[in-house]
Amino acid sequence: MSEIYNFSAGPAMLPKQVLNQIQGELIEYGNAKASVMEISHRGVDFMQVAQKAEQDLRELMNIPNNYKVLFLQGGASAQFSMVPINLLRGKTSVNYANTGHWSVKAIAEAKRYAEVNICTDSSANKFTDIDDFSNWNIDQDAAYLHYIPNETIAGLEFDFIPEVDMPIVADMSSTILSREIDVSKFGVIYAGAQKNIGPSGLTIVIVREDLIGEVVPKQPVLFDYATHANNDSMYNTPSTFPWYAAGRVFEWLKDQGGIGAMASVNERKAAKLYQAIDGSDFYSNPVNPKYRSWMNVPFILANDSLDKMFLEKSYNANLLALKGHKSVGGMRASIYNAMPESGVDALIEFMADFEKQHG
């Protein structure tokens, strides 16, 4: 049987090396005489897991010392609430960039707490382009600016960080660890784990310390960053297995040469796939090439009546989860860090063969 390549947008594939390591440690972790899923989160064995995972992530992302790294639950969707709860700090308005499906959800939640200024809106172009930053309408008195550097569904990715005189908040769920970033430019970075970090059930939050400790009154204690920062993310029982698995992914990333090395591979993988799409009359991608995602590559067949056949044949060829999101249709190949270059090559070869047969 040929190699299996999983192009799922999330939960996404994990590196095979990590899966094999987890398999080998599943029944008994280290000297714990039990599975990592069965040991106390406050015991010595898991505390070592937790501390090493945080330290490795700090090294990979070069996270400054004045930032807390939190290992939480609730996904990025919980952060849609936690961000305004923690960052309003007496202000009444916030800036949000509307560049895709997840931006829309984040905006809807922020409206429960503040007046939302939509500083840029890509809905008119169906989230295929981003307006030049010079044209953004920024509320200078707002508490923060929120944007999503990579929109998973439309495959729209920023090639710049907005420059504003207020905290910048970024939902990096589908782009974190794919390329180097300057963490110091952000007030808060948050990311659901299930794309580039590990299994679902874990959310990483990287928050500048001066933004911790002043929440909107009468909010749940678990929605206060200080609760988690003051308790090493263990105020309540954390998602221990995803936290452990994320740590194994961080180790794997370091073995690959770090984020800079991964960025080179990711850029090459995406360039190959877009070149195959652009060089064909059978496939197309609607996103402005300047803002095409490295991680999520949607493409459309010229004849959508062939979509079902494409998905069936690709699945039989061990190319999994290529169906596009229902809101945009077509196909989508998510090529996160764990996707080897050979997987992209196999997809390109399949696409070419399918076009020869049905184009």
Image (tube, helix red, strand yellow):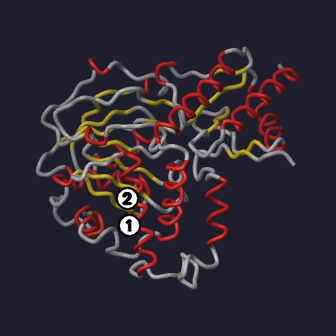
Q: Residue at x 69, y 39 (%)?
A: 322
Residue located beneath label 2 in the image: 55
Measuring from the top left, give residue 203's x and y in whole percent. Answer: 42, 57
Within 10 Å of disc 2 (Cα), the crowding (few <14, some 14-19, many 20+) is: some
Within 10 Å of disc 1 (Cα), the crowding (few <14, some 14-19, many 20+) is: few
Q: Is residue 183 above or below residue 216?
A: above
Horizontal side of residue 237 vs 117, given as left or right = right
Measuring from the top left, give residue 59's x and y in whole percent. Answer: 38, 50
Horizontal side of residue 146 vs 10, given as left or right = left
Measuring from the top left, give residue 163's x and y in whole percent. Answer: 24, 29
Horizontal side of residue 5 vs 25, given as left or right = right
> Amino acid under label 2?
Gln
Q: Is mark 2 on a helix, strand or loop?
A: helix
C-alpha gap between disc 2 and disc 1: 6 Å
Residue located beneath label 1 in the image: 51
Q: Which mark is residue 291?
A: none
Q: Which residue is drawn at 80% across and 31% down?
A: 350
Q: In this view, does 76 lie above or below 180?
A: below
